Every structure is written in structure tokens, then in C-alpha cells.
Amino acid sequence: MDEYPSQKPSLAASVIPIMVLIILLFLSIKTFGSDALEGSSQMVLLTATAVCTFIAIVFYKVSWKKIEIAIVNNITGVSTAIIILLIIGALSGSWMISGVIPTLIYYGIHIIHPDFFLISTCVICSIISVMTGSSWTTIATIGIALLGVGQALDFSPGWVAGAIISGSYFGDKVSPLSETTLLASSVTDTPLYTHIRYLFITTVPSMSIALVIFLIAGFSHSSGASLHIQEFSVALANKFDINLWLLVVPVITGVMIAKRVPSIITLFLSTLLAGVMAVIFQPGILHGFPDWIIPPFNLYLRG
């Protein structure tokens, strides 16, 4: 039994679910605005899926069993990405509460010159994204830290987010470790590096334009950054225990990335290590973990 029907759907049958999706999304956003993400958008997607399923069953005689198998196969194909998304949530939270991200922000605002901040952010994120093969990982770790640095330097969050996302997506697109790049290569039966070489035809010009824009925006930026830097430094030092030992977490994460350790393992170990650092260095934030849990190591590192 074939998994898919032998008869290909007509253009009209293919367009109907897409039009239903577009119309319902428009109505959802117009009605609920930013709250559309709270549930109505999911209902829109399910409705469009139901319309597509109805057309397949009624007009093309596709059995529900075949549709169910296709759904399971598609969920299986994205299961790794779902797991990575879940771990990234834990990773970004553990990096924040352990003081890793505040420490990166604390030292970053003293090292990166405001004129070159946007272009530096874009380049840093692109390099890390190429190494990890994941734009999500880059945005959830170093991206959050750079966003904090940008805020301290009085940059608009939109500009900083644009630099972070531009660099992260560029690196993810051309990385040989990227799941989407590997998938596109395998589906089209194209050698991986041949596929990447052709990706450069479109990504390099767009990235070059973005870098020029970020460079101009950086030199055009003027503000009282020095005052903000001092205020942020004091605020971070008062809230978190800023310690160079915390930089061990991103360093070890970088080593695992360079060694091409699988993304899920890298993210999990980085989250676990950040949790340990949180217990050691931020006991005041973690009220449920008293200092006496690991006193020798705690006193040695903090002393």
C-alpha cells in the first residue's frame, strides 16, 4: 500500500488550505493583536490542517491511516528540534540565574567599543552559529548576553536583536552542522558542501549589506553610554556574584561545540554545569539551596 495517493492534487485543492490559513491568521491577528499567540493562532493552524485533511479524504480517497502515518513521520523528523527547544529554555534560564549571562554582560560592556558593537555582535553570533549549527542555541546563550550589553550601551533593542538574529541565521544557514542545511542537502540528493557553496551566492551579499548597515549605525550612535555602563555595572554587582569562575561555563560549552559534541548533549551538560554554578555562586537567589550543601568547594571558589 502506497503511503501517498497516486493522483496529485490540483492547483485549486492545494491553494484552498493555504488561503484558509492566511485568511484565518489575518482575522486572528486583527481581532486579538499580540494576544493571538496565546491560543487563537494554534486554532488557526489546526483548522487549516483539518481543511487539508478533509480535501484529502473526500476528494482524493486518502485513508485516515495514511494521514496518521504521515503525521507521525513528520513529528519524528522534527523531534530533535523540539528537544533542543526545550533544553534551550532550561539553558537560558540556568545561564541567567547562575550569573553566567550577567558576568558576560558585566565584562562585555567594558570591552566592546560602542562604535563597533553592532557589527561585533553580528560577527560573534555568526561564528558561534557556524560552530553550533543552531541559531536557537546562539540566540539563547550569547545572544541574551549581547542584548544586555547593548542595553547598557544605550542601543535600541531592535538594532541589537537585528544584529543577533542576522548573525545567528547566517551562521546556521551555511554551517555543515545545521540540521536544516543537512536536511535540504539530503532531500535534494546534493553533496553537502556543494549545497553550502550555492547558499553563499545569496547569503554572502545579504550578510555584507547587513554588516555595512550595522557599521554605519554603530558610528551614528551617540548617547550617554558611560553613565549607563556605570549604572549597569553597579546593578549587576549588587544582584549577582560576578566571578571569573562563571566564565568556565561558556568556555567548556565552546570546547564541546568545537569538538562537535552533539547539540543535545552539549546543551544538557552546559545547563547542568550552570546549575552547579548557581548553587555555588548565587545562594542568595536560590533560597532552596543553603550554602552548607557544598561548603569546601563553595568557599574555595568564592574566597
Image (tube, rainbow, N blue to C red):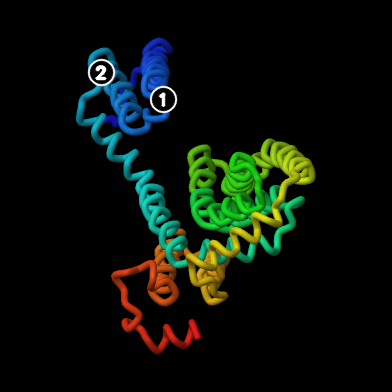
**CB atoms of marks 2 and 1 within 8 Å:** no
Q: Earlier in the sequence, mark 2 or mark 1?
A: 1
**Whole-percent x and y of residue 82?**
37, 47
Q: Which residue is mark 1?
A: 33
Judged from the image, the secondary structure of the residue bearing numbered disc 2 is helix
- Graded by Cα atoms within 10 Å as few (under 14), some (14 to 19) or many (20 or more), the crowding at tag 2 reads some
* The quarter of the displayed image where residue 190 is located: top right
Name the foreground residue: 299 vs 134: 299
Q: Can residue 9 be seen in this snapshot? A: no
Q: Can residue 145 be seen in this snapshot? A: yes
- 151 relative position to 269: left or right: right
* The quarter of the displayed image where residue 205 is located: top right
- 5 vs 194: above or below: above
Question: Looking at the picture, which amino acid does disc 1 mark?
Answer: Gly
Name the foreground residue: 289 vs 229: 229
Residue 93: numbered disc? none
- Graded by Cα atoms within 10 Å as few (under 14), some (14 to 19) or many (20 or more), the crowding at tag 1 reads few
Name the foreground residue: 37 vs 226: 226
Please identify the quadrant where the N terminus is shown: top left
- 21 vs 243: above or below: above
Residue 54: numbered disc? 2
Question: Looking at the picture, which amino acid does disc 2 mark?
Answer: Phe
- 38 relative position to 66: left or right: right
**Identity of the residue drawn at 43% across and 63% down:** 97
**Whole-percent x and y of residue 193?**
62, 49
- 4 vs 269: above or below: above
- 196 vs 63: above or below: below
**Whole-percent x and y of residue 285?**
38, 67
**Identity of the residue drawn at 59% across and 48% down:** 168
